[in-house]
Amino acid sequence: MNQEYSGSCHCGAVQFTVLTNVASAVRCNCSMCERRSAIMLAGEEGSFKLIKGAGVLSKYQFGTEVAEHYFCSHCGIYTHHRPRSNPKIRRVNAGCLDGVDSTKLEHAWFDGAGV
Ligand SMILES: [Zn+2]
């Protein structure tokens, strides 16, 4: 079931809200996600709202440079990204969300390395 969550990076400079469902949890096996190792949740289209931190977010792009990966330039934590597979949504780092224990989430694997 969709629920609105608040999220933040580790230092608190970046804060956001998103409407998402813990059942959407995935990890991805692409060259970047393998290193990042975050469990990600899919935000509903248009639901991601950056509350704070536009000035501190850094963007990382690679490969086709379609996806936009954002992280806090102060504490280094990945907060969210705009996926290549669906640029209309944002995926968020489950570990950043209040009220979500990402260490206990069942998750699927997205074959980012194979697409
Ligand atoms: Zn931070």
Image (cartoon, grey):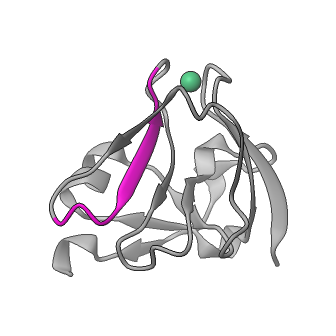
In the displayed structure, 15 sits above or below 93; it is above
Left/right of residue 108 with respect to residue 42 in the rendered view: left
Left/right of residue 3 with respect to residue 31 in the rendered view: right
Q: Position of residue 87 (x, y in %)?
A: 45, 73
Assign the N terminus to one quadrant of the image: bottom right
Left/right of residue 53 with respect to residue 5 in the rendered view: left
Of the four image quadrants, the one with ligand 1 is top right
Residues rendered magenta in the picture: 64-73
Image mark count: 0
Nearer the observer, 44 or 113: 44
Left/right of residue 114 with respect to residue 46 in the rendered view: left
What residue is at 26 percent from the left and 51 percent from the top? 61
Nearer the observer, 12 or 33: 12
Which image quadrant for residue 70? top left
In the displayed structure, 69 sits above or below 75; it is below
What residue is at 60 percent from the left and 44 percent from the top? 95
Assign the C terminus to one quadrant of the image: bottom left
> Is 110 part of what is drawn in magenta?
no
Q: Position of residue 63 (x, y in %)?
A: 15, 61
What residue is at 62 percent from the left and 19 percent from the top? 11
